[in-house]
Image: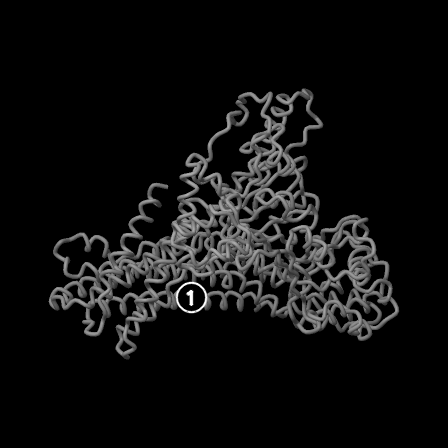
Amino acid sequence: MDDFVRDKLTEWGLCKWIEKFKEEEVDMGSFYCLDDQQIAKLIPKVGPQAKFKEKLFKEKNTVNPDTSDASAQVIPSTSGTSNKGKRKSDLQGESNQQQSPTKKQCLGKGPRSYSDEIILADVKEIMGCVLKKIPHQGNNLNNFLRRKIHDLKTDKREVVGVFGKTGAGKSSLINAVVGLKKFLPSGSISACTSVSIKVEANMQNSNYEAIIEFITKEEWEDELWFSKNFQREDEEDDSEYRDIVEKLSALYGEDWKEKSPDALMDEKYFKEIPEFLLSKKKIFTADEAKELPEQLIRYTRTNPDDAEDKGVRRWYWPLVKCVTIRVPNAHLLKHVTLVDLPGNGDTNKSRDKIWKMVIGSCSTIWIVADINRAASDKEAWDILKDACSYMGNGGQCNQIHFICTQCDRHSDADDTSEVGIRDFILKRNLQAKKEVKKEFNQLKEVKEHFSEEIFKVFTVSSVEFLNQKYLNKEQTEIPKLQEFLQELNDCHKETLNYLSGALGILSLIQGASRRGRADMKEDVCTILEKKMRDEFEKVHKQMEETYQAFEKCLSDGVEKSERSCVKVLESVIYPRRSGSGFHMTLKSLVKHNGIYKAKTNKNQKKRKQKNLNMALSSYLTESIDEKFKETFPNEVNCGPFNGKLNSFSLDTKRMKMNPEYKDVELQLEFLNAEEIKMKKKLIEIIRDRKKRIYSSLMTTVEESMQKCYDDAKGIRGTNLLRNIRETMKKHVHDSKNMFKNAKDIMLNQLGDLMNDILKDLKSTMQESIELSLKTDGYSIPDVSEELDKVKNHYKGLKGSAEED
């Protein structure tokens, strides 16, 4: 450590931490490069840490005010890159001039991020002190206040699902977008056909970490029994048998062929992964990014033929349910998780469940495809078609990004000068966008869940983003994806929400501590209670209309389902093309409870999924898709139940401006904040429960079909195929009431949701009105100083938000 660092810490009143900086050998050069996690390691206490961050940021501005935003970026520097030969082009409106970054383009830690963290830490400390001041006496107001302070929270995490086959450039894309030079090498996060891989920031330490979660022992034992039975009956099947051989050979080598399932569960096969037998997670840590793939490769890769993989005896990916990779210094992932997802669900119940759960929680989907075949990439579009119901009405996705990668390719360019190649790339990229959008507009089943407005196409080049040989950074479109992640990651709104709630609580405390006019409070209380009844009735009426509309739609769906169910079943069990081994395909379908994944040829890794339960329930889901999307939109600017919940208001903001109600101004401030918080909470509840309501249709059909599958599993002997088919046809014909049951269950769940929302809405606002206007706080502390501090913080943050 040099004198510069010692002097700075002394000047800033942080002498206590000098020894720690000396121990970590922080000098003038590294001083300005410190990131959040390094600062947290040097100064673990929140107060001094926040003070240091504020001082450091001001110091950066003083040292180089013109580049203060850019200094916080984690993007590799390209300042020495030549732009020779570049000229202005009218193809996409780009300019060869280097533009200074805008506020939104400044990734990593900008002034607002630092300011938000400091303010949030200060307000949390204030509310902690206020909580200690409130007496533990058992009166309603004190209990209410303590509960409200405990309920204040800022937790936020957005999930971005990433689809794309191996070789599409997912690894390079994520490397460039996250902004770390050495994240993971290409191919290392290429999930096998089953494993979901999550990538998020490590906010606890500076290590790279990987957390591996396994399927259960019972699930693997079940797969082994099926695999051995399948192998004994027909080794010539072209689809599932190859999958079985791939899985068992990966884990056991050649040992599996002559051994029983019980023998294959012997502990000797799992010596390196005792966590699997103990139903625990396995955790790897590494100091450098390049070390992690070496440890992970046996848990995420399916191809043991690579030269780099020689010498590896056992592969554990068949046992893995999901992998979570945590990356230090990944500021864009602080509140965002990227998930590399298989193309569709899995026959393994555990993996299928986590796939549905993750895709249902994605607010954004990235579909990654090579630009040379993006519009015609059948696999990419099949992914979107297969998953659209889980993402849309059954999920919360409000943005779909189709990302065409490797857009720097130019082998077909006639003019091979730098300018000629640049123009060729830009023209080809523009054409690719048009073709991809045209293809999207032809997907009828997808458009039932998503509008054209939420579908965007990006043409990116990770190579050009780093090298800038032909394109500047903006033309690679990586900055657009970074800006998007930064907006998802931005905690400014969450900080504002916390401050709004804190301001409301402090306003109530201070208002209750004053002995105001009882007659004024009573009059205001009467006005607000009447207003609440009127607003409540609007929401209630809309919900009744919604319920009736769903009942009509579902009745139509039941009628169509009962009329067509046998025909739907026969289209699955009597396919147009079925070879001599179709009995094994059908046996696999019933073994996996209605789901079968078929490879169309020996060279394909991805398998097209057939889901009989989804097919049988399709008329029901189609009958309510449009109404469901209208009632529970995923778009952030729309609200559930035709926006009636969003528009619910006691009008306290307007009343607060009226001088007549000056004496209850603070109580009205609290009620306004409480109303905002209450609506946000109810909308989150609706978002989560609507997923279960939508999926209940197929779930009911699945449960009704379970006996059919169980009966079919036990069929043996001659005429196997005919007997399975007859058993299934008889069950479906005799069980047509399952569609009416599905309708009733969905309507019951919808009714329960509506009743719970109305009950919560009424009780929350009624309690808030009564406790703020019908209670005098004789034992309530004075919080005028705390109220002023939070109010000033809130005004400052609110002002910056309005500027943006």
Q: Indicate the colouring scheme.
A: one colour
**Above or below for 598 versus 689:** above
**Above or below for 416 versus 302:** above
Quarter holding residue 528: bottom left
Residue at 79% x, 69% y is 269
Q: Which residue, as the protein is rendered here, is positioned at the far front?
A: 3
Q: Horizontally, is 534 left or right of 330 in the view?
A: left
Residue at 84% x, 58% y is 580
Residue at 67% x, 31% y is 409
Residue 621 in sight:
yes
Name the one closer to the observer, 606 or 548: 606
Residue at 27% x, 79% y is 137
Quarter holding residue 682: bottom left
Name the one closer to the observer, 712 or 800: 800
Element carrying mark 1: helix
Name the one closer to the observer, 528 or 440: 528
Quarter holding residue 145: bottom left
Residue 494 in sight:
no
Q: Which residue is mark 1?
A: 753
Q: Amino acid at mark 1?
A: Leu
User: Could you say where residue 740 lies in the image, as x and y percent from the top left?
Assistant: 53, 67
**Above or below for 221 versus 409:** below
Quadrant of the frame with the C terminus: top left
Q: Horizontally, is 520 left or right of 430 in the view?
A: left
Q: How many marks?
A: 1
Q: Which residue, as the protein is rendered here, is positioned at the far bottom?
A: 138
Q: Which residue, as the protein is rendered here, is positioned at the far right?
A: 258
Q: Residues within 10 Å of mark 1 (few under 14, many from 20)?
A: some
**Above or below for 249 versus 435:** below
User: Could you say where residue 99 lies in the image, as x and y percent from the top left?
Assistant: 48, 30
User: Could you say where residue 594 lies in the image, as x and y percent from the top left?
Assistant: 67, 63
User: Could you say where residue 116 lies in the image, as x and y percent from the top left?
Assistant: 39, 51
